[in-house]
Amino acid sequence: MTPRIGMMLASTVDSTSVVVVRWTAGDQEVTCGGSPMVDPTQADPTPRQPPDPDRSTGTLLGKRYATEDGTVELLCTRPGKGTLAVGGTPLRVKSAKPLPASD
């Protein structure tokens, strides 16, 4: 499944749910806790197994997760215990841009 902008994805190992904000990574797999994420309208996103202990740093509600090169950006709509990754590379929390100073 190739994610597209606006698509919702749900984890199969915890309660994590995200919305795709930016996707130019081609046909790569989005995982959470080491397991592929699914379209919640197409499959049952009920957690089936615990997340991989090495991939369980957790997700935070309302935070954006992105790759270092900016090709992928996901918005967390429901937090969980699993680590988000694309193509096996963990995503990091995207930092906010500073506002311009008004002198």
Image (cartoon, rainbow, N blue to C red):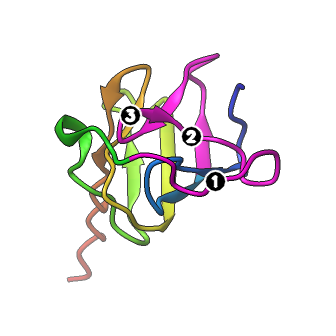
> Does residue 21 show up magenta in the picture?
yes
Label 1, label 3: how far apart the Cα atoms are: 17 Å
Secondary element under disc 3, as helix, strand or loop, is strand
Q: Which label number is shown at residue 85? A: 3
Q: Position of residue 97 (x, y in %)?
A: 31, 60
Q: Which label number is shown at residue 37? A: 2
Q: Position of residue 38 (x, y in %)?
A: 65, 41
Q: In terms of sequence position, does the residue under pointer 2 or pointer 1 come before the other?
A: 2
Quickly name the residue at label 1. 45
Label 2, label 3: how far apart the Cα atoms are: 10 Å
Q: Position of residue 6 (x, y in %)?
A: 72, 51
Q: Which residues are magenta?
A: 20-49
Q: Nearer the viewer, residue 57 or 50?
A: 50
Tell me the amino acid under the disc marked 1: Pro
- Tell me the crowding category of disc 1: few under 14, some 14 to 19, or many 20 or more residues within 10 angstroms, Cα based: many
Q: Is residue 34 above or below residue 87?
A: below
Q: Is residue 102 above or below residue 36?
A: below
In which quadrant of the rendered view does residue 87 lie?
top left
Q: Residue at the location (23% across, 75% down)?
A: 101
Tell me the amino acid under the disc marked 2: Met
Q: Residue at the location (45% across, 49% down)?
A: 13
Secondary element under disc 2, as helix, strand or loop, is loop
Q: Residue at the location (70% across, 26% down)?
A: 2
Secondary element under disc 1, as helix, strand or loop, is loop
Image position of 85 (left or right of 41): left
Q: Main secondary structure of the magenta part?
A: loop
